[in-house]
Image (cartoon, rainbow, N blue to C red):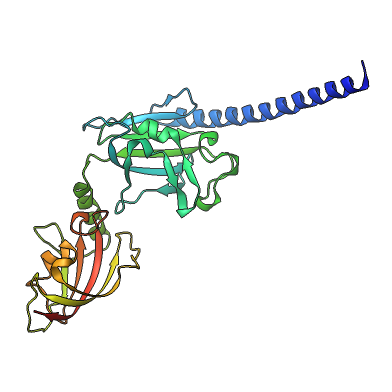
Amino acid sequence: MNKFTKISLCLCLLATVLFSACQKEYDSIETIDDAAIQTFVNASSIKYTKDTKGYYYSITNPGTGAAVKNSDSVFYSYKFKTLAGQLLLESSDVMIPGKFLGYTDQFSINSTTVNYVFAPIREVLSKLNRGGKATLILPSNLAFGKNGLSAINVGSNENILVELGIFSESKRHQIDELEINSFITKNNLIVIKDASRARYSIINAGTGADAISLNSTIVANYVVRSLDGVEIAQPSGQITSVLNGLFKGWQLILPGKVTAGGKLRLIIPADLGNGATPLDFDIEIVSVTN
């Protein structure tokens, strides 16, 4: 055997040993994960099924609404926890996420540019009807892996429990009602509900002589926020416009309720605003011209 052949054989042997060592390490992590999950499952009152991909799930409520497929739009909820019960991440009940079912496995966490994909979440949600709930256990290799995610306190090789649900409501206006009601309750607001589904609170009716109509030109200072309290910076400020050119919610609420000098808080569902999400306004009427 020549020198070159001996070197080649040694390199091949070394590569085989290294590959085997890596494979054993990977296998041992999967084994450790599964043992930890099984310990959790055996101590739980919930019956879990193990999927062939390695995750565990339980349909705690199949739902009584319609079945959903990947091309259907769904409003859903999620709550990520450690197996010890520490809350890591959860959806908001005033900004309920809505996507096509086929995209519910994609998460941008803490506004990072990284898009995390958890296929088992979509797969388990697809087993539910509208109104259904499920619990999912992700082994670390299907969750955040060996690096974890310090931004939400996920440790290295951490197994993750995910509580999932699909809302019975399938329409934007139905979800708006849930979000707005939750927002009002959380903030202890006292508001009037208009027949249009807008909510408002008159802080000061104003002392101007000219009543506001759809054809009035108004000057108004305003601040607009999404229901999570984040100010939508670009539209906020002062505006001069004929009322019938502004948000439908403004058109329905301002006439007959305020005039120059008036102030109000106005919460409008998506279809009376930008079409995307409910909006929360602070409005001050500076002047009215008829």
273 shown above or below 288: above
Residue at horizontal 45%, vertical 48%?
Answer: 108
The percent coordinates of residue 27 (x first, y second) are 62, 27
Q: Quadrant of residue 127?
A: top left
Q: Is residue 161 left or right of residue 221?
A: right
Q: Is residue 8 left or right of residue 28?
A: right
Q: Is residue 15 left or right of residue 108?
A: right
In front here: 162 or 84?
Answer: 162
In front here: 202 or 231?
Answer: 231
Kindly give the residue lying farthest to the top in the view shown: 1
27 shown above or below 278: above
* Residue 98 visible (yes or no): yes
Residue at horizontal 45%, vertical 54%?
Answer: 111
50 shown above or below 183: above
The percent coordinates of residue 235 (x first, y second) are 30, 68
49 shown above or below 277: above
- Which image quarter holds the C terminus? bottom left
Q: Is residue 89 left or right of residue 264?
A: right
Q: Quadrant of residue 137?
A: top left
Q: Quadrant of residue 67?
A: top left
In front here: 90 or 41?
Answer: 90
The percent coordinates of residue 187 (x first, y second) are 27, 63
The percent coordinates of residue 86 (x first, y second) are 47, 46
- Which image quarter holds the N terminus? top right
Q: How many marks?
A: 0
* Residue 199 visible (yes or no): no
Residue at horizontal 26%, vertical 41%?
Answer: 167
Kindly give the residue lying farthest to the right in the view shown: 2
